[in-house]
Amino acid sequence: MLDRRTALASLLATTALSVSGCRTPMHAEADWLVAPWGDAERIVAAIRRVAIPPRTFPLADFAPAADDARPAILAAIRAAHEAGGGRVVIPEGLHLSAGPIQLRSNVELHLAAGATLRFLPGEALYLPPVRTRWEGTECYTLSPLLYAEDCENIALTGPGTIDGQGAAHWLPWRETQKAAQTALRDMGRDGVPVEQRIFTGERRLRPHFVQFNRCKRVLVDGPRLIDSPFWMVHPLLCEDVIIRNITCKSDHVNSDGVDPDSSRRVLIENCDFDVGDDGVSLKSGRDQDGWRVGIPTEDVVIRGCTYSGHAGGGMAIGSEMSGGVRHVFVDGFRIPKARHTLYFKANLDRGGRISDVFIRNITAGETASLLVFTNDYHSYRGGNFPTVFERILVENVTVARTGAGISIAGHPDAPVRDVVIRDVTMGAAKHPLQISNAPGTMLQRVMHGTRMISLADAEPVPPSVPGGY
């Protein structure tokens, strides 16, 4: 329905220029640029909606804030599932869970106003290990705190809070898990069977917060998620996902807000990401393991969101995107302060292809970078598989102050192709325009202060610094 892989017929009319491998010939508008935003509406309309039967299953009696509420919650979920579906309500108050909560098909878990579901720490509580993808490589490791696998028609709703207690109990593992990370990446590179990739005990990895694994028709609407152990909301190998009206609050690194991973038909809207990493990051597996699975993230619409953190980035694609990312529409993202505003990140291990991405209506305050494309992201392991970036439209963007404004770093063997940037205003920028190996790059009405800039103003991207920064 949305295949745009046909070759470019032409580019937007502009003066022919050639700077650092960038060329913009004078032609009519290319086919892929003609009214692309109608496709965003078609994606949203095509998402199959969750429909939960209108009946409620209460929790058994227990003492909030004292007893472990997990058995009562799991019993209610099981009863709802066996009855053909329904809603399980967690009432007002503090409720502890000594281990993961597993959702089941046709069940909605609803957190009432004033309810807090707090997960207790402890590796043994999150065993046995489950199959997942950890930073892009498949393995068996600790269960996510709230988890669903091979489910259909499931929902997580309500204005209540889910607390992962990540900073005190799980974040310290980051300093001791380097050997496990390396071992897992080696297994992915070498094609070790997934069933042999067991990561518990001494080879331990932090668990995800909320993960939907191989699920269809998923809704997350309303909850506040705080203090994550790792990535916060992770739809993995899913179809027909709607995530809306959530607040993610987690100040430490690796607390990505939402990470759609090898998933399709995804809508993310009206969310607030106050996190210490990326607000939204689109992913599809890492290196050889991502190629083995070979499932892209595609048909994604992100609209009306806010990034209110400051240490991470607002909207990212990558870096674990080896299965590809395509047909992405980002409309309306407010980013008062961030490290990176719009970040396309890969390195020479990743391979893969990012294509047909359309971004508009971005408002940023103070950021270290505004728009970055790089094939030099960190954790490079010596490969020679540059990522292909092509057919990207960025329009109607403002930033008050930034370090690297527009930084497009293509690789000689895989240039960044056909990036169109128009109606962009940078109030102040240390390096407003850096471009290398990016044929087909085109600027229209790009302002630095009161001055309109063109490709003739471009500096080369420093080769040793990813994306210029």
Image: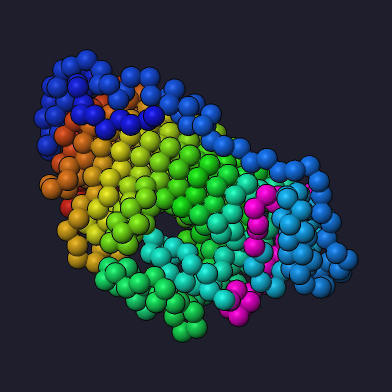
Q: Is residue 113 magenta?
A: yes
Snapshot colouring: rainbow
Using residue 219 as the reference point, say whether residue 44 is left or right of it: left
The residue that appears at 27% across and 50% down in the rendered structure is 352
Q: Residue furthest bottom?
A: 202
Q: Position of 310 compared to 376: left or right? A: right
**424 shown above or below 258:** above
Relative to 425, is 274 on the left or the right?
right
**x%, y% of residue 229?**
56, 66
Tell whether 452 sits left or right of 463. right
Q: Is residue 161 above or below residue 432?
A: below
Q: Is residue 291 above or below residue 65?
A: above
Quarter of the figure with residue 300 = top left
Q: Give the percent coordinates (x, y) of residue 105.
A: 64, 53
Quarter the N terminus occupies? top left
Q: Please identify the quarter of the rendering in which residue 58 is found.
A: bottom right
The span picked out in magenta is: 102-127
Residue 20 visible here: yes
| Residue 299 within the segment the image draws in magenta | no
Viewer-closest of 445 and 432: 445
Q: Position of residue 97 (x, y in %)?
A: 71, 69
Between 424 and 207, the one lying in front of the other is 207
Residue under the point 31% across and 59% down: 292
Residue at image position (88%, 66%) is 61
Residue placed most toward the observer, 385 or 109 = 109
Note whether residue 347 is visible. no
